[in-house]
Image (tube, rainbow, N blue to C red):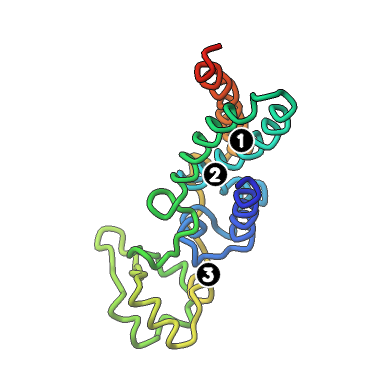
Amino acid sequence: MAVFVIAASVYLWYVILTHQYQYKYVFSYTSKDLPTGLLFSAFWGGQEGSFMLWLLLTSIVGIFLQSYTSKRGDLEPRVMAVFTLATTFLLIMVSPMFKNPFEYIWNEPIFINVKSISQSFLNLPFLQSSFFSDNQTGENFIRMSKELYTSLSSAGVSVNQFITDGRGLNPQLLNFWMQIHPPILFIGFAMSTVPFSFAIAALMKDD
């Protein structure tokens, strides 16, 4: 399981760093003007990515834990059973049912500022019904939906051609500490699973 989690995490970093805006998470938390450090840390900029980071770190801890317990008699089955249950909970949290960081942007309707849309496609005839204006701010938006995605695909336009920039990180997260504080925090969360697993394993054996 750890191998698949690591592979999924590497892929998430890849789509973030290469601005793959067909993914809702990438569009929602990245933009092309983010410096490399903050772009890298956009991985944990939202709930979906935070759970993914927690799962990634827990899986890595699990690799070392399994190596440690495998050399200590009957300890491995009980400890790893508890640890696997805890990891499975995190795995469920990043599944399509809950906080999926790989959800496509057209799965649920989302409003995209026209500033983030390629100007060369704004005159497409089928696009006119997807235009919306905010009377208070005077800004214009495109309603991205499954119907619009189908129309774009039929016209030979990919979502990544259509959307040229993302929303970017929350302004409150645009600082150096965003790059180091969450990983340190989630390392602590991941490590706390180890004593929990040993404690439950001891109770199972009545030690």
Q: Where is residue 62? Give x, y as percent.
A: 64, 35
Q: Give, as a three-letter code, the residue at label 3.
A: Thr
Please give the residue where the numbered disc 1 appears in the rendered image. Answer: 183
Please give the residue where the numbered disc 2 appears in the rendered image. Answer: 44
User: What's the CA distance linking mark 2 and mark 3?
Assistant: 22 Å
Q: Give, as a three-letter code, the residue at label 1.
A: Pro
Residue extending farthest to the top is: 207
Q: Quadrant of residue 127?
A: bottom left
Which circle, 2 or 3, is nearer the viewer? 2
Q: Quarter holding the C terminus?
A: top right
Helix, strand or loop for disc 2: helix
Q: Give, as a three-letter code, the residue at label 2.
A: Trp
User: What's the CA distance linking mark 1 and mark 2?
Assistant: 8 Å
The earlier-in-sequence mark between 3 and 1 is 3
Residue at 59% from the left image edge and 27% from the top image edge: 79
The crowding category of the residue bearing disc 2, from other C-alpha atoms within 10 Å (few below 14, some 14 to 19, many at least 20), is: some
Please give the residue where the numbered disc 3 appears in the rendered image. Answer: 164
Mark 1 and mark 2 residues within 8 Å of each other at the beta carbon: yes
Does 100 sit above or below residue 78? below
Helix, strand or loop for disc 3: loop
Helix, strand or loop for disc 1: helix
Mark 3 and mark 1 residues within 8 Å of each other at the beta carbon: no
Q: Where is residue 55? Give x, y as percent.
A: 55, 41
Residue at 44% from the left image edge and 45% from the top image edge: 92
Which circle, 3 or 1, is nearer the viewer? 1
The earlier-in-sequence mark between 2 and 3 is 2
The earlier-in-sequence mark between 1 and 2 is 2
Does 76 sit above or below residue 56? above
Residue at 59% from the left image edge and 55% from the top image edge: 12
Left or right for 42, reference 72: left
